[in-house]
Image (cartoon, rainbow, N blue to C red):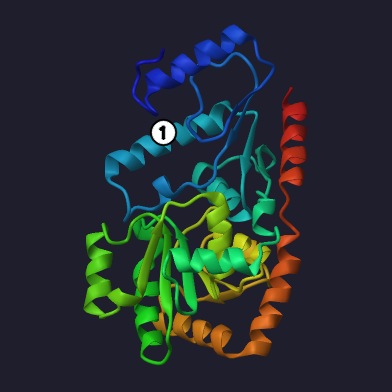
């Protein structure tokens, strides 16, 4: 058993040693922590480089470590896979790579989000989590770059005019002191609902129970939640930042992530204008067809064949 620390050089050398012993034809590192000392062609997936470009989110030592590890991955990999054109361009600009070394392969959307669910199942889900009003859903982590403050402030504006609930699935917002303080300051604690870490089936039901899904992030290498919303037949609102515009295409609504007013306007429009809402849903169904796990697998396998 490898006793080296997670993400340590020792761990990466140990993985290479074990892989070399297997005499594999190709090694695929699904994260930018590519092993040191591999004796076969290597493919590395780099989902994003936030740890390098996000100066305001990470300490100097963490940024140096990330730059060192990603530089190593870029140097030893026969091919690099990224999830979006956005991440590819960031890599090219930051690490000065050859354009032909970096391949954009979009991720897919699980069929669990486009499956059929009975009204009874959705109703039981809503009852379980006390969702008694139209809901705005956010799903994911609450890290600083996720820009949750703007969502909370926009919801507070909406509460002055509408009867809604703001639902968080994933990381606990009540344990995030700064965010929960903002919720309390805006007097919206009764209508902020935390459903926590739930199963994938329940997550699919959370989308079906929502009136709209919001991804306010300032940085994304891909952005699953907007696509999962589209597959579920729910309008998606995303920040005009990172890869989100690329992934959303014309299937959702973009807003200025620094503007509470812009997000508030987008929410009011999609919640109050039925014709507009249906048009957004229709475009979302069309856009999400661009993303397929089968296509992702086929393109990834072709990369393996090319480097071997």
**Vertical side of 110 occupied by 249: above or below:** below
Residue 215 seen in the current view:
no
Query: Would you identify the image quadrant in which residue 119 lies?
Result: bottom right
* Residue at horizontal 34 percent and vertical 59 percent from the top: 144
The image position of residue 240, as x and y in percent, is 53, 70
Task: Measuring from the top left, give residue 195's x and y in whole percent.
Answer: 41, 60
Residue 101 percent location from the top left of the image = 66, 37
Q: How many marks?
A: 1
Q: Residue 279 appears at what percent x and percent y?
A: 70, 81
Compared with residue 51, is residue 176 higher up or lower down, i.e. above or below? below
**Crowd rating for badge 1 (residues with CA inside 10 Å; few <14, some 14–19, many 20+):** few
Determine whether, in the image, residue 62 is placed left or right of residue 133: left
**On the rendered image, what quadrant is the C terminus found in?**
top right
Residue at 37% across, 54% down: 171
In the rendered view, does 29 fall on the left or right side of 275? left
Q: Is residue 170 above or below residue 44?
A: below
Can residue 16 be seen? yes
Residue at which label 1 appears: 68
Report the quarter where the N terminus lies.
top left
Residue 194 or 221: which is nearer the viewer?
194
Q: Nearer the viewer, residue 209 or 20?
A: 209
Which residue corresponds to the image point at 52% horizontal and 83% vertical from the top-left?
Answer: 266
Q: Residue shown at 47%/59% (left/top)?
A: 219
Q: Quadrant of residue 282?
A: bottom right
- Per the image, label 1 sits on a secondary structure element best described as helix
Q: Residue furthest top?
A: 21
Near-viewer residue (84 or 181): 181
């Amino acid at each position: 058993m490898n006793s080296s620390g997670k993400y340590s050089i020792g761990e990466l050398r140990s993985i290479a040693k074990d892989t070399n012993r297997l005499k594999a034809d190709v090694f695929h590192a699904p994260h930018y922590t590519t092993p040191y000392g591999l004796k076969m062609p290597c493919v590395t997936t780099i989902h994003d480089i936030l740890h390098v470009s996000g100066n305001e989110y990470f300490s100097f030592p963490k940024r140096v470590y990330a730059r060192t590890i990603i530089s190593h991955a870029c140097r030893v990999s026969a091919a690099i896979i990224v999830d979006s054109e956005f991440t590819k361009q960031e890599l090219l600009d930051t690490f000065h790579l050859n354009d032909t070394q970096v391949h954009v392969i979009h991720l897919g959307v699980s069929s669990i989000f486009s499956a059929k669910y009975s009204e009874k199942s959705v109703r039981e889900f809503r009852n379980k989590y006390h969702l008694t009003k139209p809901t705005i859903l956010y799903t994911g982590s609450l890290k600083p770059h996720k820009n949750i403050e703007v969502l909370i402030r926009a919801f507070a504006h909406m509460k002055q005019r509408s009867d809604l609930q703001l639902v968080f699935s994933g990381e606990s917002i009540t344990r995030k002191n700064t965010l929960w303080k903002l919720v309390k300051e805006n007097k919206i604690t009764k209508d902020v609902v935390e459903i926590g870490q739930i199963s994938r089936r329940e997550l699919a039901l959370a989308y079906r129970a929502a009136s709209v899904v919001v991804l306010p992030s300032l940085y994304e290498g891909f952005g699953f939640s907007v696509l999962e919303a589209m597959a579920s037949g729910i309008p998606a609102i995303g920040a005009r930042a990172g890869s989100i515009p690329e992934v959303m295409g014309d299937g959702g609504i973009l807003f200025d992530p620094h503007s509470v007013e812009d997000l508030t306007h987008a929410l009011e429009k999609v919640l109050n204008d039925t014709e507009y809402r249906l048009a957004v849903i229709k475009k979302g169904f069309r856009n999400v067809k661009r993303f397929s796990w089968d296509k992702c697998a086929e393109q990834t396998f072709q990369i393996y064949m090319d480097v071997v």
